[in-house]
Amino acid sequence: GNSVTQMEGPVTLSEEAFLTINCTYTATGYPSLFWYVQYPGEGLQLLLKATKADDKGSNKGFEATYRKETTSFHLEKGSVQVSDSAVYFCALSGSSAGNQFYFGTGTSLTVIP
Amino acid sequence: NAGVMQNPRHLVRRRGQEARLRCSPMKGHSHVYWYRQLPEEGLKFMVYLQKENIIDESGMPKERFSAEFPKEGPSILRIQQVVRGDSAAYFCASSPAGLQTYEQYFGPGTRLTVT
């Protein structure tokens, strides 16, 4: 079946620290992979995506590379800011997943000044 | 350009009552998806609809839950005879087409509390 596994949170970092949030997936075929961010009290916003192996998605300083060989899509940012505090969700869709999105459980990030 | 709109944002119901959640997709989007987020969990797919059609309801509980997306008006997720376990955040998303390469745009969610 299809599933997404994210690293457990919560994660607390100091401003300007390096961020990695691990995400691995299980799927048949070649799904598209996504990172969504949810700020308090709001809906999910697309952060970045990658649609095929070795693609790198990037946005607002965040990056993630679609690694078929390790079935991973880890999110990274070189220098986090207080405004990055949010919950981050890894997700997959397409291929055997069809139109459904499969989400990880989310990783809460708090950045302290 | 308004995003996906959901109302109400917060809904409180007593056990046994009905809950009706509304979702207006983004302008030009004809595909709507409903997800449920239980506390401390990720979003779980419930149902995928196009105008007047249910395309995939594999994530919907077999009883008490129904969804529609009429030709005119918003999509409605209805929960009859609510129970405490229905307390969750319900998110609606829309997309311009059903192709998997289209990302889905999410609304702010409706937080249902059953007392």
Image (cartoon, rainbow, N blue to C red):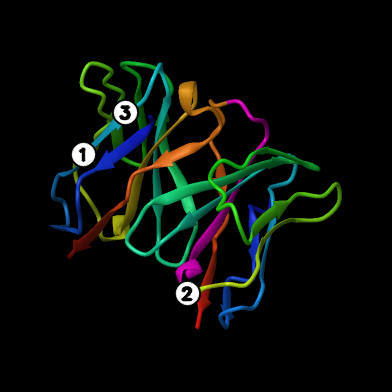
- Which quarter of the rendering shows the C terminus of chain A? bottom left
Find residue A5 and report its image quarter: top left
Q: CA distance from mark 2 to mark 1?
A: 33 Å
Name the residue located 48 percent from the left edge and 28 percent from the top edge: A97
**In this figure, which residue is indicated by the disc labeled 2?**
B84
Q: Determine contact: label 1, label 3, CB under 8 Å.
A: no
Give whichever of A64, A4 is nearer the camera: A4
Q: Which chain's residue wears label 3?
A: A
Q: Is residue B59 above or below residue A28?
A: below
Element marked by disc 2:
helix
Left or right: B41 as drawn, with respect to A44: left
Q: CA distance from mark 1 to mark 3?
A: 14 Å
Find residue A18 and report its image quarter: top left
**Residue B97 within the segment the image draws in magenta:** yes
Magenta-highlighted residues = B85-99
- Farthest residue toward the front? B63
**In this figure, which residue is indicated by the disc labeled 1?**
A22
Q: Is residue A15 above or below residue B15?
A: above
Q: Which chain's residue wears label 2?
A: B
Name the residue located 22 percent from the left edge and 16 percent from the top edge: A69
